[in-house]
């Protein structure tokens, strides 16, 4: 009887891992089984394997199954061989959470120059990193509000800061219309809530309310203009999470399309998850990659876009 219960629980757990991304975003199970990387969610199977190799026959059989599932989980890492092109001119975009406690990131401006970045999205900008960019790039154009910043090589002709529904006092969705040599496009940048923090503040119901509200608001903002659009920022959501998948229905996720490597951006010292994203509409995506450790708790995400021919 105990063996049947054990096998039932093991099978149910694996089934939930597989089914979670396809559940409605409003379900708490969806959040619980998609906000963590799937290989970390397999931690209980590691325990089964460790215990099983030292126990009776039933446990040994279970441990073999657990090891098999963990081997299969390697494919959830979603390593990508780039089919993008870096040798074609386009708009180079960088999204970077600079960590609110950082008063200075000396390497940031030099990195922007070296990578020939044209558009920068900053999150958690407490003032210092943004000021350093302004000082190092005097010919650039800037728009910032509530610790978010858009910095553009080309003129910003129109801008707006829209309070984020989940954190209206401290976070915003920034929009900027940019004139790139007579061709206008729209840049939209934000910093969304972290599901883990929402759960601590009000349980999984709080998580779902925050994320569903943020998704609806983002869709409304993006739909308010017909200009070609680049959208991104720290979305605090991995690729399996419903918000990321829902946006992919209408917009191209740069790393998903032409990314190189694993794409992990957090934590910077030993990245294990991709929670920073760049999307586009009305552009061809040429390349996408994760940058080096520059002194924040995130690594920057870079992507190159080009107007259609």
Image (cartoon, rainbow, N blue to C red):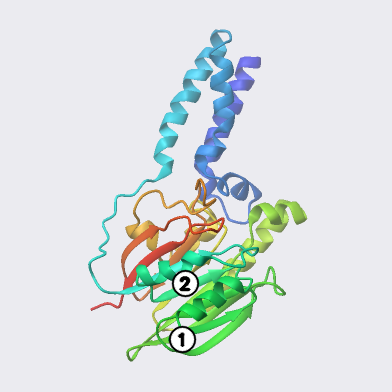
Q: Quadrant of residue 198?
A: bottom right
Q: Quadrant of residue 110?
A: bottom left
Q: What is the number of the mark on residue 231?
A: 2
The answer to whether residue 90 is left or right of residue 163 is left
Q: Position of residue 147 (x, y in %)?
A: 62, 73
Q: Position of residue 216 (x, y in %)?
A: 58, 70
Q: Quadrant of the C terminus?
A: bottom left
Residue at 65% across, 76% down: 146
Q: Position of residue 223 (x, y in %)?
A: 49, 79
* C-alpha span from label 2 to label 1: 12 Å
> In the rendered structure, are the residues bearing label 2 and label 1 in contact, judged by CB atoms less than 8 Å apart?
no
**Residue sticking out furthest to the right:** 202
Residue at 58% across, 49% down: 35
Q: Which residue is mark 1?
A: 177
Q: Position of residue 2 (x, y in %)?
A: 66, 16
Residue at 64% across, 71% down: 126
**Residue sticking out furthest to the top:** 56
Q: Reply above or below: 61 against 199.
A: above
The answer to whether residue 24 is left or right of residue 278 is right
Mark 2, other Cα within 10 Å: few <14 / some 14–19 / many ≥20 = many
The answer to whether residue 36 is left or right of residue 278 is right
Q: Could you tell me which secondary element the residue under label 2 belongs to?
A: strand
Q: Reply above or below: 158 against 56.
A: below
The answer to whether residue 153 is left or right of residue 30 is left
Q: Reply above or below: 44 against 81.
A: above
Which is nearer the N-term, disc 2 or disc 1?
Answer: 1
């Amino acid at each position: 009887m105990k063996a049947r219960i054990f096998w039932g629980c093991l099978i149910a757990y694996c089934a939930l891992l597989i089914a979670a991304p396809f559940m409605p975003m409003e379900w708490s199970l969806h959040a619980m089984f998609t906000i963590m990387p799937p290989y970390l969610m397999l931690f209980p199977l590691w325990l089964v394997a460790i215990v099983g190799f030292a126990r009776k026959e039933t446990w040994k059989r279970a441990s073999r199954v657990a090891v098999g599932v963990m081997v299969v989980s390697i494919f959830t890492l979603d390593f990508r061989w780039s089919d993008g092109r870096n040798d074609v001119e386009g708009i180079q975009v960088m999204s970077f959470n600079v960590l609110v406690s950082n008063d200075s990131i000396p390497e940031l401006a030099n990195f922007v120059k070296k990578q020939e970045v044209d558009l920068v999205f900053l999150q958690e900008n407490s003032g210092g990193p943004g000021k350093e960019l302004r000082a190092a790039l005097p010919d650039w154009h800037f728009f910032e509000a509530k610790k978010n910043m858009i910095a553009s090589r080309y003129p910003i002709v129109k801008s707006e800061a829209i309070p984020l529904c989940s954190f209206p006092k401290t976070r915003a969705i920034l929009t900027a219309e940019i004139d790139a040599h007579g061709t206008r496009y729209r840049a939209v940048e934000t910093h969304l809530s972290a599901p883990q923090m929402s759960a601590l503040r009000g349980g999984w119901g709080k998580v779902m309310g925050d994320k569903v509200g943020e998704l609806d608001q983002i869709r409304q903002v993006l739909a308010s203009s017909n200009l070609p659009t680049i959208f991104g920022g720290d979305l605090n959501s991995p690729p399996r999470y419903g918000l990321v998948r829902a946006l992919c229905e209408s917009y191209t996720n740069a790393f998903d399309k032409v990314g190189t490597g694993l794409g992990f951006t957090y934590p910077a010292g030993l990245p294990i998850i991709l929670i920073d994203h760049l999307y586009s509409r009305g552009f061809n995506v040429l390349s996408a990659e994760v940058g080096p450790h520059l002194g924040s708790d995130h690594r920057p995400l870079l992507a190159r876009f080009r107007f259609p021919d």
